[in-house]
Image: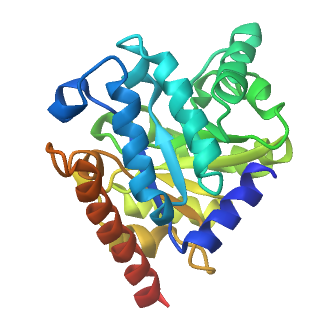
């Protein structure tokens, strides 16, 4: 099953557009988990507690690689694939390179970690995306209008009468989507641009970071980015869910926040109709 089909099934079976970001900070992991496999245990417990509430999990590779925990990331990805195969697995890596290097990055995401999709940076152009798009059935989630405050430094620069992020959206629709299974990253912190992207790309899936700790508004996000079917987005929340509690109840607390976020999204979809 390809990325788009798996995501459509995840939306249908979970009734959720929530994506749970897995960004484990060792300093915030509950004390009772401390040990050589603390990162894996923490993330696996969060995944187990929230799997029925989410359409996707999104481990961020930097949080593992920075402390030499890639083996724990491999275990986590395998745990998700085996125990929660209905949930889309996104490797948040934001890779961007060319030629054999890009091919190695694609191999890392899709073979080593077995991800359904990976985030990529399109700044180097189409040939930097081709090695990822060559993996049939895998998702290539391209940065478009990101949620960080400095994103406009480049993404809002105007060329040929349109800001750069709109050119990315048009290229995704008119070119890259014909080469593979494409989605875009558009931040919840910019609902007006989110609505513009949705108007350009039709029903193309959007990964939408920025709710929760970053302050993006769920209602505004749904109004701007949901498709006519009431889906179309993977709305990511990381820190608000992961660190809902620092105690032994961390997984239960994470589930409560995930449930509240899922329900808030669903209510916004219902109200929109």
Instruction: Pinpoint residue 45: horizontal percent, then vertical percent.
Output: 38, 45
Q: How many marks?
A: 0
Q: Which residue occupies 61% across, 30% down? A: 122
Instruction: Pinpoint residue 65: horizontal percent, then vertical percent.
Output: 43, 15
Q: Left or right: where does residue 101 sit relative to residue 92?
A: right
> Which of the 4 quarters of the picture holds residue 107?
top right
> Is 208 or 39 nearer to us in this picture?
39
Q: Which residue occupies 71% across, 44% down? A: 171
Visible residue check, residue 163: no
Vertical position of residue 51 compared to residue 29: above or below: below
> Which of the 4 quarters of the picture holds residue 247?
top left
> Colour mode?
rainbow
Q: Which residue occupies 61% across, 51% down? A: 88
Q: Left or right: where does residue 271 sit relative to residue 120?
A: left
Q: Left or right: where does residue 17 sit relative to residue 262?
A: right
> Which of the 4 quarters of the picture holds residue 198?
bottom right
Q: Which residue occupies 41% across, 21% down? A: 64
Visible residue check, residue 12: yes
Instruction: Pinpoint residue 42: horizontal percent, then vertical percent.
Output: 33, 37
């Amino acid at each position: 099953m390809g990325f788009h089909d798996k995501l459509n099934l995840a939306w249908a079976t979970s009734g959720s557009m929530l994506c749970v970001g897995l960004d484990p900070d060792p300093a915030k992991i509950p004390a009772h988990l401390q040990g050589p496999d603390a990162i894996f245990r923490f993330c696996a417990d969060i995944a187990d507690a929230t799997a029925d509430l989410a359409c996707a999990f999104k481990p961020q590779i930097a949080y593992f690689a920075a402390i030499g925990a890639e083996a724990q990331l491999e275990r986590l990805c395998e745990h998700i694939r085996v125990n929660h195969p209905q949930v889309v697995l996104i490797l948040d890596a934001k890779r961007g390179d060319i030629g054999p290097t890009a091919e190695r990055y694609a191999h890392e995401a899709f073979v080593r970690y077995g991800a359904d999709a990976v985030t990529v940076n399109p700044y180097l152009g189409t040939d930097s995306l081709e090695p990822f798009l060559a993996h049939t059935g895998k998702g290539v989630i391209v940065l478009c209008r990101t949620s960080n405050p400095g994103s406009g430094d480049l993404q809002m620069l105007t060329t040929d009468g349109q800001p750069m992020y709109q050119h990315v959206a048009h290229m995704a629709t008119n070119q890259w989507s014909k080469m593979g299974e494409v989605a875009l990253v558009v931040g919840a912190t910019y609902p007006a641009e989110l609505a513009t992207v949705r108007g350009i790309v039709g029903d193309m899936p959007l990964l939408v970071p920025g709710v929760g700790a970053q302050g993006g508004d769920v209602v505004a996000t749904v109004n701007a980015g949901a498709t006519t079917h009431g889906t179309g987005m993977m709305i990511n929340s990381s820190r608000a869910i992961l660190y809902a509690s620092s105690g032994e109840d961390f997984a239960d607390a994470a589930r409560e926040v995930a449930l509240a976020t899922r329900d808030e999204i669903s209510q916004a979809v219902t109200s929109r109709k």
